[in-house]
Image: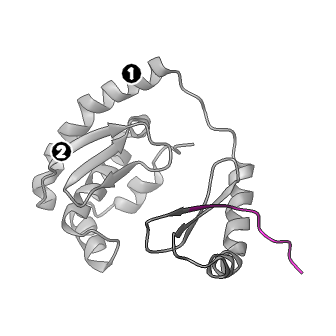
């Protein structure tokens, strides 16, 4: 019999149950306010193997590099200089124009796109090679037209950047 997976439960006004493995290896489960504990437990049990695999991967990684506030400010400034230009360059190619651009200090994702048409990029993206930066920019611009990772999204990405897989592989890890 397998040991029970330890996790922290966070309830909120969401519709689905989700699970994440945090950088330190902690497992966090997010559930709707109305979800029964039996539903949560069944969800956790069904994904225990996935969580254990990802915990092992997280714990085998080197520790996250810490940056000073000064270093982060410099990265953000550099990102503010580079990323809007790259967005302006690729927006016509994709046929999308963001409502705004935000630079964050996210360590869990390179970029994101909101339903309101705003794109956000991690300042740590600027540590990647230019071709990898362009991949993330185009990826987020494609989300302005396709808000999912379905076939239409990948067709659009492929038409804009046929070598997107190689560019993605060149990304500098965020952690």
Judged by depth in the image, the label closer to the viewer, 1 or 2, is 2
Is residue 9 magenta-colored?
yes
Residue 100: give its label. Answer: 2
Q: Earlier in the sequence, mark 1 or mark 2?
A: 1
The span shown in magenta is: 1-10
Dot 2 alpha-carbon crowd within 10 angstroms: few under 14, some 14 to 19, many 20 or more: few
Q: Nearer the viewer, residue 100 or 175?
A: 100
The residue carrying mark 1 is 74
Task: Identify the image quadrant of residue 165.
Answer: bottom left
Q: Position of residue 53 (x, y in %)?
A: 71, 66
Residue for point 17% across, 51% down: 90
Q: Is residue 69 positioned above or below 140 on the image?
A: above
Task: Identify the image quadrant of residue 122.
Answer: top left
Image quarter in which the N terminus is found: bottom right
Dot 1 alpha-carbon crowd within 10 angstroms: few under 14, some 14 to 19, many 20 or more: few
Q: Position of residue 21 (x, y in %)?
A: 63, 58
Q: Position of residue 34 (x, y in %)?
A: 52, 75
């Amino acid at each position: 019999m397998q040991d029970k997976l330890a996790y922290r439960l966070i309830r909120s006004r969401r519709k689905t149950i989700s699970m994440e493995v945090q950088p330190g290896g902690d497992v966090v489960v997010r559930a709707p306010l109305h979800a029964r504990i039996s539903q949560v437990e069944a969800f956790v049990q069904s994904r225990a193997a996935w969580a254990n695999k990802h915990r092992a991967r997280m714990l085998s990684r080197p520790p996250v590099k810490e940056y000073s506030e000064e270093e982060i400010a410099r990265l953000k400034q550099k990102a503010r200089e580079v990323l809007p230009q790259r967005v302006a360059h690729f927006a016509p190619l994709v046929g999308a124009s963001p409502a705004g651009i935000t630079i964050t200090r996210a360590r869990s994702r390179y970029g994101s796109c909101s339903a309101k048409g705003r794109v956000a990029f991690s300042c740590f993206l600027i540590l990647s090679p230019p071709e990898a930066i362009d991949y993330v920019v185009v990826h987020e611009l494609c989300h302005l037209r396709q808000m999912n990772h379905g076939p239409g999204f990948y067709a659009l990405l492929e038409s804009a950047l046929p070598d997107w897989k190689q560019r993605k592989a060149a990304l500098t890890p965020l952690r």
